[in-house]
Amino acid sequence: MRELINPTPLKPARKPAAPVVIWNLIRRCNLTCKHCYTTSTDIDFPNELTTSQIYTVMDDLKEFKVPVLILSGGEPLLHPDIFAISRRARDMGFYVALSSNGTKISKANIDEIADINYQYIGVSLDGIKDTHDQFRRVKGSFDQALSGIHLCLDKGIKVGLRFTLTQDNAQDFPALLQLMDDNNIDKFYLSHLNYGGRGNRNRKDDAHFAMTRDTMDLLFETCYAWLKEGKDREFVTGNNDADAVYFLHWVARKFPGQVEHIKAKLQQWGGNSSGVNVANIDNLGNVKNRPFSEIWLDTTDPLMAGLKQQPRPLEGRCASCHYQDICNGNTRVRAAQTTGNFWAEDPGCYLNDIEIT
Ligand code: SF4
């Protein structure tokens, strides 16, 4: 969007030495959300990394030149050593962000949170009030999360709203944008749900895809309007790299003269970068047995090799897609979950056949 308003020349693409790491430090969570991808709950899970094992992994990540740690969970603030871990990460020079459900940010710990100086705290909201509480299955969790957000804002901490879009909360998206505007919140992260789908359905008539498209249109329009008003806010979308192609079509409709410039920028961005610029250390891996840096570079694993291959060995409509260089085949886990084949087309692509030719 900034490139539409203030175009900048195309510079050589940055090639980071190591990926951004999203780190699910702990699986325990005080909430049990309907859409939780780690199936967390409020118990201690066995075999998680001890704090000293976390430090060993952190040292390896630093040496490997990982620039960013996004500390997540479960609920990372339930980790008994979260502040020591965060402080150590900051002292080592990582960019450190926290992904929280917000309910554990309180008057009792806000000074300590502010003192860590996280570069960013993302708080998940699934909607306004009742919608959120229903999703989170805890009454009052919306008010608690909002109070956490206000405590952070009062301390000048950069805060973002994190919203996972589903058919049951899309209706709250406009109200969340309003909440963002009213509170002058810096960032909005919209995550698409990893929607499996039902094989070869008709994309044109699919209600889920229609809802996704409407939501993206509103996101683009709001982002553009706010930037024009001088409100410098960030929008990020995740879990669906077809967003970039959909955005290009939006630009073609609204700003036809700038399509080529935006296309070049999106090509440079290059679409999905799992296995290249983005990594996740989840609760099930084996960084206890092998350093992250070794696992990351081990392309004897066919999935790791395929993710790092350029172009990826894609199949189905992703293989023949005209915008592969902008999307890079989207989310491979979704393809694998629905077909058992990591290289099958992504069933979460909400573009119709005309839009990919
Ligand atoms: S067809 Fe595949 S590569 Fe093309 S936009 Fe859709 S998900 Fe991306």
Image (cartoon, rainbow, N blue to C red):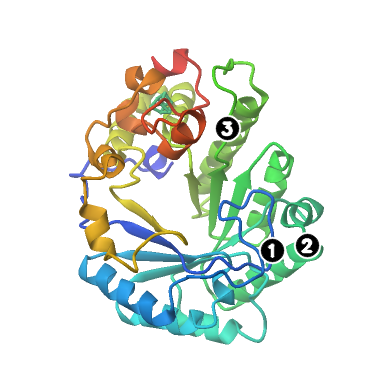
The answer to which of marks 1 and 2 sits earlier in the sequence is: 1
Amino acid type of the residue that numbered disc 2 sits on in the rendered structure: Val
Q: Is residue 285 left or right of residue 103?
A: left
Q: In front: 13, or 92?
A: 92
Distance from mark 3 CB to nearest ligand 1 atom below 8 Å:
no
Q: Residue furthest left?
A: 12
Which quadrant, please, contains the C terminus? Answer: top left
Res. 75 image quadrant? bottom right
Tell me the crowding category of disc 2: few under 14, some 14 to 19, or many 20 or more residues within 10 angstroms, Cα based. Answer: some
- Residue behind mark 2: 138
Amino acid type of the residue that numbered disc 3 sits on in the rendered structure: Asp
- Residue behind mark 3: 217
Q: Residue at x 58, y 15 (%)?
A: 202
Q: CA distance from mark 1 to mark 2?
A: 7 Å
Amino acid type of the residue that numbered disc 1 sits on in the rendered structure: Leu
Which quadrant, please, contains the N terminus? Answer: top left
Q: In front: 24, or 122?
A: 24
- Residue behind mark 1: 31
Report x, y in % for residue 292.
Answer: 28, 62
Q: Secondary structure at mark 2?
A: loop
Q: In front: 111, or 81?
A: 81
Tell me the crowding category of disc 3: few under 14, some 14 to 19, or many 20 or more residues within 10 angstroms, Cα based. Answer: some
